[in-house]
Each structure stands twice: as structure tokens, then as C-alpha cells.
Image: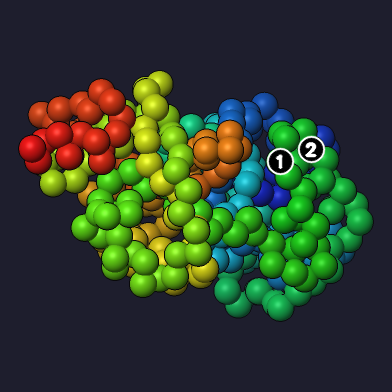
Amino acid sequence: MAPRYSFAYGSNTDAEDWRAWCARTGHEPAALKAISTGILPDARLAFDFFGRGRGGGVLNFQPRLGGYVEGVVLEVSEAGWRALDQKEGVPHAYQRRQRHIILPDGQALEAIAYQVIPERQEDFVAPPPAYLNAVRQGFAAHGLHPRVLEAAAIGAEGCHLLADVFVYGTLMQGGFWHGPAAQAGITSILPAQATGTLFDLGDYPAVSLGAASQIRGEILTFQDIASALPILDEIEDAAPKGAAGGMYRRTILTVTDTTGRRRRAWAYVMAPENLSGASVITSGDWRAHHAQKSK
């Protein structure tokens, strides 16, 4: 069975560029349909491949723990996969890579992201203006911030580096796991709230997404997020890169701090199927709930 979604982070974000390519090659433009923006976690953009058809550098993604890349989730028909594989030069230029993509509400889906094969990657290849402008146009059409794209276009680091982690249970100040987490170098702690449902799992809580309740917690800002995340992933029994398979899944949520500022932060959530029999903490406040239980 063919996969359903592709994650676009380069020229495939631009509908005009896609339609022009389809007109030249005889493919059907409607084979791709943009359904949402999305985030590729633990990644960065890089112009590290010379695209002969473009006459210069084209985009690729590389690992970057703690970073993320914004893009567009495309729903792809069976004919669309044949077209995409041809456009991306599979298997001689790019290869299909299955990745977990984070949606705006923190939920995730599996999608194919095209990545340059290792033997074709270079250090930096400057992009030609026409290609760069197509990607700029695609980013603008979907409300994606161009800062990361522009940084990658001059050979700088092309990712949003996210040093904040929203915690709501034993990783908060005074919690059992706060000490081990603090060894990774916490530079600030700020009360904050997120949206979801908080559950009592006995000695610790879990959050499930999809509800409108407010969850009280803290934003921990780390000096070196790339060093902190492996520690936190292990504490939370979470698979790397936001993948499923662990007890918790690392995602990105929009949280609100005490100044009223809305900001993105890493967070660990649990799938509803793993919460069978768990009771809801209606206050959304694990610290107060746990203190009441301990009386």
C-alpha cells in the first residue's frame, strides 16, 4: 500500500513551481494536495546538493537534534508518488525517508520526506535565484517563516533551534526527575500553560492532546538543548525524532507563559490508547493534585 502523505520543505511547497513542472512532464498537478503545515523535528535545512535541472544548489534536510524545519504536508495520490519520485530523481539523487511530522496542534502523522542520498551530498552549494524564489514563494503562501531558508541559502545553520521544554509533572521544580534534568543545564524556569487533558498514572501524570483544558506546568530553558533531549527522552521513555514506540512521544506545542506570550516548546505527550483506566486531573495541575493525594 502506497504511503499517503509527503512532507515538502523546498520547491514542492510552491504550487506554481509544481504546476509548471507537471506541464513540462505531462503529470497531473492535482496528484498533490496541500492539507496542512507541519514540522520535521530534529532536523535542519541545507543547500548541499547540485541540482542539474536547477543549475545550482537545492534543498536537503540533515539531522539536527533540538532543531526543527517547517514545511507543508501534502496528500499524495498513487500517480502523485510516481511524479514525485521522478521530480526528485529517485533513486539517483534523492531517496524516500519515512518521518514523523508534527502538526500545528501537536498531533503527528507519518510522511515521506525526500532526502539527498549520502554520496551526492556536498558541503554547500549556493542556490540559483529562480529556485530560491520558488521556495520563498511557497513559504509565503503557507505562512512559513523565511528566516531558516535565508540562513541555509548563505551556508548558515538552517533550522529553528528550540531550547524550551514544557513540563507538567515530575520534571517540574521539586519533582523526582527535575534534578537529573537540571544536570543538562537549565538557564531559566517559567510557569506556563498548555492545552490538553492531564491524566493521573499514579506516581506521575501524562498529557493527551485534543481537548481544550488548561494544563499548568513550567517552561524549562536549556543551555544546550542537543545535550538535554537525549536525557529527557530517556527519562520519558520516548523514541528519538518524535517517533512513536515509546511510552511518551516528544512533540512541539504552543504554550503560554506568565507574560501572556505564546511560544513553542518541546513537550512529552501520551497516546489515548495508553491511558485506558487512568483518571482525569480536572484541575490540570499535577503539583496541587499530587499534594492533595499525599495528605
Is disc 1 placed on a helix, strand or loop? Answer: loop
Q: Residues within 10 Å of mark 1 (few under 14, many from 20)?
A: some
Above/below status of 212 relative to 239 = above
Please indicate whether residue 285 sits to the left or right of residue 45 in the image: left
Name the one closer to the observer, 182 or 197: 182
Q: Nearer the viewer, residue 59 or 32?
A: 59
- Residue ID for mark 1: 144
| CB within 8 Å, label 1 to label 2 | yes
User: Does residue 104 appear left or right of residue 196 in this picture?
Assistant: right
Residue 75 place in picture, x, y as percent: 55, 32
Residue 76 visible in rendering:
no
Q: Which quarter of the figure is the C terminus placed in? A: top left
- Nearest the viewer among 96 and 123 is 123
Question: In the drawing, does residue 250 fall left or right of residue 10?
Answer: left
Residue that appears at 82% across and 67% down? 154
Horizontally, residue 111 falls left or right of residue 49, namely left
Kindly identify which residue carries mark 2. 140
Residue at the front extreme, as displayed:
295
Report, in whole angstroms, how far the alpha carbon at label 1 lies from the one at label 2: 6 Å
**In which image quadrant can residue 236 be found?**
bottom left
